[in-house]
Image: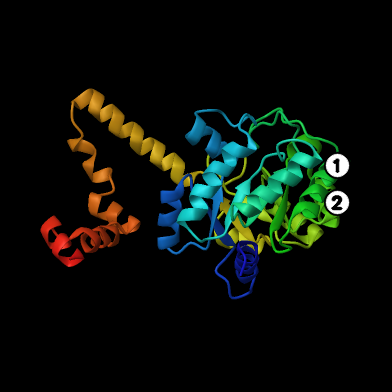
């Protein structure tokens, strides 16, 4: 089963009446986070464009990073985890040919899905003011470029619209419907304010929709149960773990600076044995013991 097929299957299962709620798609800022998410039973993971800019390059989420910057982190994550990975490709990194190349490279890197948005090239974080969007026609062309470029029909093309903040709910829904008609498999309405808005989208587009439950943004932190009642199929937590990691690191840096030691923050840390457990360290070490346990003298006698 391809990664795209795995992602579709997970979404379909989450939409069943007996499901506990939307498919949780958790942000994994690096390969190790992806490994932890998989061990803890999550079914899908996410790589945020803003997260790549922040964590890998020390840049703000303003469309500064390139396709190759994103691909580097995609490859690292898909090599470490076989969970289906949804990737943020911003506006596609250029025109139609660039978008097509992006889709081909994302498939080659074993991503399961991408979302592409309708902001202008000089984009902003979706929860910041003064966003600007392209015409509905240009966004439809972006979707067509994605759909035409994919080799695996199961690879998921998700259309994100930031139009609510710019043109209002009706225009945002119209754009989403136009994207579905152009071939988008799923819809990501960004920065919604109410559950009723999600329900309006779900009823209009007739494909699975994603709710971005990001902290400190425009969208309240709705529960899975609330989102399910509104018809949401996927709940995205793009940078939740990353934000917690950042605060923990800051606490350590401040403790070292102010106290001259880390004794007061050790309890906040993952232990060495826990790290080794997630990495399978002891399995690697056992292999080393097997390969190199013979002494040079013994190895020589075995050769003879």
Give the label on residue 188, or none.
Answer: none
Q: Is residue 146 above or below residue 126?
A: below
The residue sitting at 58% across, 71% down in the picture is 19
- Residue 238 visible in the picture: no
Q: Which residue was labeled with disc 1? A: 136
Q: State the SS at label 1.
A: helix
On screen, residue 119 versus residue 60, left or right, reads right
Apparent side of residue 6 relative to residue 42 in the rendered image (left or right): right
Give above or below for 80 relative to 219.
below
Measured as percent of width and height from the top left, residue 48 is found at 57, 43
- Does the image show residue 276? yes
Q: Nearer the viewer, residue 205 or 90?
A: 90
Cα distance between the residues tagged 1 and 2 = 8 Å
Residue extending farthest to the top is: 258
> Do residues under tags 1 and 2 come within 8 Å of each other at their CB atoms?
yes
Q: Earlier in the sequence, mark 1 or mark 2?
A: 1
- Decide: few, some or many residues near mark 2? Use Cα within 10 Å; few <14, some 14-19, many ≥20: some
Disc 2 target residue: 178
Residue sitting at x 27%, y 44%:
268
- Residue nearest the viewer, comparing 155 with 132: 155
92 to 198, vertically: above or below: above
Q: Classify residue 145 as left or right of residue 225.
A: right
Callout 2 secondary element: helix
């Amino acid at each position: 089963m391809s990664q795209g097929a795995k992602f579709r299957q997970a979404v379909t299962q989450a939409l069943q009446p007996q499901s506990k709620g939307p498919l949780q798609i958790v942000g994994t800022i690096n390969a190790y986070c992806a490994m932890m998410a998989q061990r803890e039973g999550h079914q899908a993971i996410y790589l945020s464009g803003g997260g790549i800019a922040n964590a890998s390059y020390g840049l703000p989420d303003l469309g500064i990073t390139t396709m190759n910057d994103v691909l580097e982190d995609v490859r690292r994550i898909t090599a470490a985890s076989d969970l289906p990975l949804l990737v943020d490709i911003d506006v596609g990194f250029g025109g139609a040919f660039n978008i097509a190349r992006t889709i081909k490279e994302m498939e080659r890197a074993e991503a399961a899905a991408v979302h592409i948005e309708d902001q202008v090239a000089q984009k902003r974080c979706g929860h910041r003011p003064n966003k600007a969007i392209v015409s509905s026609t240009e966004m439809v062309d972006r979707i067509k470029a994605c759909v035409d470029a994919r080799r695996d029909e199961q690879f998921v093309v998700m259309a994100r619209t930031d139009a609510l903040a710019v043109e209002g709910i009706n225009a945002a829904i119209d754009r989403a419907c136009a994207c579905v008609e152009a071939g988008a498999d799923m819809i990501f309405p960004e920065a919604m304010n109410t559950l009723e808005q999600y329900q309006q989208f779900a009823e209009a587009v007739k494909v699975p929709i994603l709710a971005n439950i990001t902290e400190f943004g425009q969208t309240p932190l709705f529960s899975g149960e609330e989102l399910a009642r509104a018809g949401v199929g996927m709940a995205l937590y793009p940078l939740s773990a990353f934000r917690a990691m950042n605060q923990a690191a800051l606490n350590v840096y401040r403790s070292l600076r102010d106290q001259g030691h880390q004794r007061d923050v050790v309890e906040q840390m993952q232990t060495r044995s826990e790290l080794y457990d997630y990495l399978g360290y002891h399995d690697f070490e056992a292999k080393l013991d097997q390969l190199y346990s013979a002494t040079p003298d013994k190895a020589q006698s075995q050769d003879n």
